Image (cartoon, grey):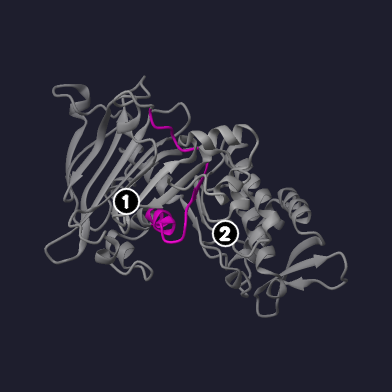
Amino acid sequence: MATIEGFRVQNFRSLRDVTIGKLAKLAKPLDGKAKAEPLTPFTVVIGKNGVGKSSLLDAFGFVADCLATDVEQACDIKQRGGFERLRTKGVDEPLRFEIYYRENPNGRPIAYELAIGMDKTRRPFVKSETLKQARTGTTLGRLYPFMALENGKGNVWAGDEALGTLKNTKEDKQQVHIELTDTRQLGIATLGTLKEHPRIKQFRDFLKGWYLSYFYPDAARGLPHAGAQRHLSVHGENLGNVVQFMEREHPDRFKEILVRIAKKIPGITKITTQETLDKRVLLQFNEASFQDPFFAQQMSDGTLKMFAYLLLLEDPEPPPFICIEEPENGLYHQLLESLAAEFREHATGKSNAPQVFVTTHQPYFVNALVPSEVWILEKGEDGFSTIRCASEIEIVKNLTDEGLPLGSLWYSNYLDEK
């Protein structure tokens, strides 16, 4: 499964210029310094309130929304409030994003670069969009474009090789000049549907599959219309529908989920669904001490949230990239290390495992992590955010090697900027 090795965001709220992980320009050591390391399969961002954790998570969501709708609608989503509210204050430059990833661990790296500016009518548009890939037989070094668009115009190279930069070559003959009719749509949204551009399609499908979880227990307490659904929605309002699907299509996998949730929340013996007369679905929780079941409307936020995360992780067709904001809310603190272990197990334990990206401010959750998995987001005196990996702090590496938990070090200010 594809894995993001690095992500850069510029001019997005307080994220003036933040890079997490490794980018194409940072693949090799620079000026004698150690090379940047790629993101781990399970990555966690920590930091104080107001440093930009939600903005970083939303930067991923914004790029995904640009594909799902268009750049203008992505800017105008209610919580974003338009392009001018998204762009860093005092900056006239475009919003910029770079995604550095591989289709598989041994695959050639690919970089996607996106810039969103403001046109003469004061509306956001795609200023530039590029997809690049390393040559066949190489995993590092220069990346060559196979899609390069500026203001909706540019060149694309058909086929499976990203070598269309040399003149008078076979690759040069694959070059096609294009002009898009709508500069508010991403180029990958259109070109990714064409058979002659399989590499663009691969990236489009990868980005389309991203999942950002904003689970609300109250949403899961609703009464959705009955009918099995494969995947959990962003807010979790179809939790009962996903249970119907798992009961019917994957009963053994669903039993495993029940076993695990029973270990984390004592007393839960069975979770089932029941259809009402008006064809809505009731989610039922059976507890050992009571003969009659409890309904989702009566269950605690923590129970619903833990159950939803286990369902998400056990999706038979998991998304390639999962983002979760502050999963600790509503959960008993002693469950947090166990939940972090669940995330890591599912991010690393299978060949088609999803990459999991989490933000948190809970030291108990961080206690289950190692320094290479944790990135610390801070805010500088200029008001802009900066980020660094906990593994870059020598004393933290030494203390965790001695067995001290990382969350406790964070609580004791060892991870704060000195």
The label nearer to you, 2 versus 1, is: 2
Query: Which residue was labeled with disc 2?
Result: 232
Residue displayed at 43% across by 28% down: 107
Q: Residues within 10 Å of mark 2 (few under 14, many from 20)?
A: many
Q: Is residue 55 magenta?
A: yes
Which kind of residue does numbered mark 2 sit on?
A: Leu
- The answer to whether residue 205 is visible is no
Residue 131, position as x, y percentages in the image: 29, 39
Question: What stretch of residues is rendered in magenta?
Answer: 35-61
Residue 70, position as x, y percentages in the image: 30, 59
Q: Nearer the viewer, residue 95 or 384?
A: 384
Judge from the rendering whether residue 218 lies leftward or rightward of residue 416; answer left or right. Answer: right
Picture layout, residue 13 above or below residue 167: below
Query: Which residue was labeled with disc 1?
Result: 189
Residue 80, position as x, y percentages in the image: 35, 66
Judge from the rendering whether residue 222 lies leftward or rightward of residue 29; answer left or right. Answer: right
- Which quadrant of the figure has residue 198? top left
Residue displayed at 68% across by 75% down: 297
* Comes first in the chain, label 2 or label 1: 1
Q: Is residue 134 magenta?
A: no
